Image (spheres, grey):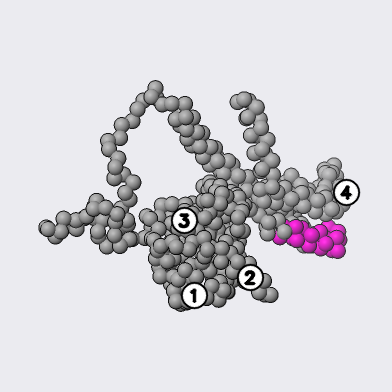
Amino acid sequence: MFMVHGKCLKAACIMLFLMILFVLLITQVGAMNLYCAGNTYTGKYDLSKPHEVNVHSDEETRNNNMKAWYQQMLAWGYTEEGAAAVLGNCARECGFGEADITQGGVDWEDFVYGGTGLGMCQWTFYARQDLLFDTAYDMGKQWTDLGVQLVVFDKEFNGSSTVEEFKTSHDLYALTVRFCDDYENPKNDDGSEYPRRYEYAQQYLDMCKGLKAKDYDGVFDTSSTSSSEGKADTSIGILSEWELTGMPVKSGLTANIGTLELGDRSSLNATDMVNIASIGDDISLTKTYNAWTTVRVIIVFVGLLMLIYALMLMLALFVDKFNNIFDFSMIGIITFGAIHFSDDKYSSNGEEDVVRTTDTKRMVILIIAIALIGGILVSGGVLPFILRAVYKVTSAITG
């Protein structure tokens, strides 16, 4: 019934299988790739929303964050050398001098769950990133917030047995090596990481010399407040809400603020009007981002359908090639009769019913073409070009 070209079909199918496997390996679904080693983030933190990263690269911001972290470690009981050893390691992890240590090293759109380092410790392993994202969600903040990252560090490293050495030892080099090996664990077969991290640790020890222990405001409870505001009237034995166990530190930002009166638009100066317009633009941009995210999901879904359909066509081709018993065509069924498969140039269903057929070679080409288009759509490779073209067209229209 059908002629069998086993070697040709086998080679084509192996090539198609390898191509589909490669496409699936480079697939990026949604605004970022959330897959790594079979794990996907399943918490409540929204990874699809825009995140501002790598926006604070100035030395002052970076040093202020490091000093705040240093003071918090002193408040936890670390020695000065123990705190500096931690900072030296993390400065090396974050690419010292390139970006704010609390943020990422790549654009958020390129973030890979379980593969891209985040934050002051460059948390990479997916379990550590789960803790970072979940903590940010519980605190109602983004993961880039220094307070969130301090809480994560407190939960993880301060709960380990290693931390006791950082509260007693004054050997800066030994502590640097210990944190490198026990916590950061970089590729360091030849020990070349130790001298650079020790150099950074020494820099921070010199920079932070003389700073006092201080809890990071707004994250950890402090033992006292700077004023009598919020204190309970002990004469009647009633505690204020801010003295209850587990309550956060009360902010003093509003202590000297009187009645707030909002003016109308006519009272705004040029700077205020520009700021308001900028806020409106940000809101509009967020809505636009959500719309493009929806479009991208639809495109990825269509691509997945095409890959599945290409796989079905390949299986149908196998069935039809080796089916010499039953008089039906699997390819004809799944294409709803649009394709008539035969290795003969023409097929006759009767004396006058002669139809053009598609042979094995053409079927393989068709399957590869469908799989390639589907793979491009799934990987998102075509989407940036489409978005860029649409953006240029809309910008030209709106001026």
Farthest residue toward the left? 236
What kind of residue is marked 4? Answer: Lys
Front label number (4 vs 1): 1
Amino acid, disc 1: His
**Residue 168 occupies quadrant:** bottom left
Question: Secondary structure under badge 2?
Answer: helix
From the viewer's perspective, is the residue at label 1 or at label 2 nearer? Answer: 1
Q: In the rendered view of the protein, which quadrant contains the C terminus?
A: top right
Judge whether residue 43 can be spotted in this image: no
Q: Which residue was labeled with disc 2?
A: 195
Q: Earlier in the sequence, mark 4 or mark 2?
A: 2
Image disc number at residue 170: 1
Magenta part of the protein: which range? 1-21
* Label 2 or label 3, whichever comes before in sequence order: 3
Element assignment for label 1: loop
Spot occupied by residue 243 in the image (x, y as percentages of width and height): 24, 59
Q: Verify whether residue 20 appears in magenta.
A: yes
Q: Which residue is mark 4?
A: 345
- Seen from the viewer's position, the closer of residues 127 and 168 is 168
Disc 3 marks which residue? 146
Cα separation between marks 3 and 1: 26 Å
Image coordinates for residue 306, horizontal then vertical, percent: 68, 49
Q: Which is more foreground, mark 4 or mark 2?
A: 2
Observer-side mark, 3 or 4, equals 3
Residue 389 seen from this side:
yes
Q: Earlier in the sequence, mark 4 or mark 1?
A: 1
Query: In front: 318, or 150?
Result: 150
Which element carries disc 4, helix, strand or loop?
loop
In the figure, is residue 164 to the left or right of 57?
left
Q: Which of these two is toward me, 84 or 394?
A: 84
Q: Give amino acid for label 3.
A: Leu
